[in-house]
Image: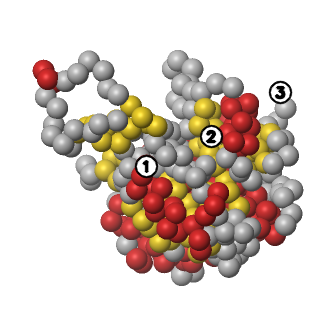
Amino acid sequence: MQPGPLAGRRLIVGVSGSIAAYKSVYLVRRLVEAGAEVHVALTRAAARFVTPLTFATVSGRPVLDDLFDAVPGTHVTLAEAADAAVVAPATAHVIARLAHGLADDALTTLLLALRGPVLLAPAMESGMWAHPATRANVRLLEERGVRFVGPEQGPLASGLAGPGRMAEPEAIRAALEALLAGAPAAAGPRRDLAGERILVTAGPTREPIDPVRFLSNPSTGRMGFAVAEAAAVRGAEVTLVAGPVALATPPGCRRVDVVTAAEMRDAVRAALPAATALVMAAAVSDFRPASPRGHKVKKEAADATLALCPTDDILAGIGPLAPAGLVKVGFAAETRDLVAHARAKRKAKDLDLIVANDVSAPAAGSAPDRGFGAETNRVTLIGRDDRAEALPLLSKRQVADAVLDRVAALRSGNPAAPVPPAP
């Protein structure tokens, strides 16, 4: 078997004080199984959730949890030898300390001495993640080249639900592999989209049957929100047209909320004249009820059939409205004949790039690793030359950056942008 991208890598896994620390045990195990040399550093609070002995047993190496108990200079030695560091979970407190260069324990001292790439997997309550102080700290770290994976949407320790769950170990591992494969932001912040005005659509649409029922799909909006967030970090002015999703607005983005396909069409048309690129990542409903009812249809009075009619094709209808030089990117969610259907869709809608995503059901007993609701994605990029380039399994943020690499290249007049090789 050929060694994987993590084989022989020296990695630091930092763990801070969150209930999500239990997932980090599985992350360390996965990294060790992939052939990496893993050194774990804990905050004092993290050790209250998972003991240093647990991490020492799983990693096979001593754990750094107290600078005063360690051999002098250990943090410098580890920092100089490490290929990368990942902090999972990264609490709001640790993110704040890293943003402001505070080094008062084993983990933050180690990371301040590190010169390699850093990946953070946030974990906190939704209100903490959305707080202006946290958003500012995240933005500051991203400008320095720190990468983020997650947080994800779902149930939280408080019993509430929302954005704030730490990404799953496999998603973190995929993001780390991409980082070590040479993801450009690892070497420092990119502002290659400065001056661009990017219009992004995300999430599903809902087509009402009656006031309480609707047709829709399982899209969570994560992919489109990742594109919007990455574009803003890279300097673009971003307008995000979002269907009904429970995601926080990415920093630096102007958000327009819509519900139906018609509302999304109107919002896109309103923003289009000022745009230099359009990324249609939304899962727009293809059909709507032909005659929505004004009152709730009672079960006993319902018809046996529901008449449908097609919604307006947003991409196909923008031709006369598109400003000169507009880069048009579409997404194709398919369950079979992925590349063939995506190529046909790209041609029919005159797109510069289409992102083909297999959303067929996973094998029995397997968790989905791509498509609706997954934390990672496995996509194929197809440009005007019809060449299909398969990307490896990546976090949705990494997919977003790969798509934006193409957008930046097309805007600069060089359509041959680099794409990570398939495994």
* Residue found 54% across the figure and 25% down from its top: 361
Q: Which element carries disc 2, helix, strand or loop? A: strand
Image location of residue 177, percent across then percent down: 71, 48
Relative to 87, say whether 155 is above or below. Answer: above
Disc 1 target residue: 261
Please tell me the numbered disc located at residue 332: 2
Quadrant housing the C terminus: top right
Residue 21 in view: no
Image location of residue 94, percent across then percent down: 48, 69
Relative to 251, say whether 247 is above or below. Answer: above
Structural distance between the alpha carbons of marks 2 and 1: 17 Å
Of the pair 94 and 285, the residue shown nearer to us: 285
Structural distance between the alpha carbons of marks 3 and 1: 48 Å
Of the pair 75 and 350, the residue shown nearer to us: 350
Give the residue type at disc 1.
Answer: Ala
- Mark closer to the observer (3, 1): 1
Disc 3 target residue: 1
Side (left or right) of 180 relative to 94: right
Give the residue type at disc 3.
Answer: Met
Quadrant housing the N terminus: top right
Q: Which element carries disc 1, helix, strand or loop? A: helix
First of labels 2, 1 by sequence position: 1
First of labels 3, 1 by sequence position: 3
Relative to 285, say whether 189 is above or below. Answer: below
Q: How is the image coloured?
A: secondary structure
- Mark closer to the observer (2, 3): 2
* Residue found 55% across the figure and 74% down from its top: 139
* Residue found 56% across the figure and 38% down from its top: 371
The crowding category of the residue bearing disc 3, from other C-alpha atoms within 10 Å (few below 14, some 14 to 19, many at least 20), is few
Please tell me the numbered disc located at residue 420: none
Say which quarter of the image contains residue 140. bottom right
Image location of residue 22, percent across then percent down: 45, 45
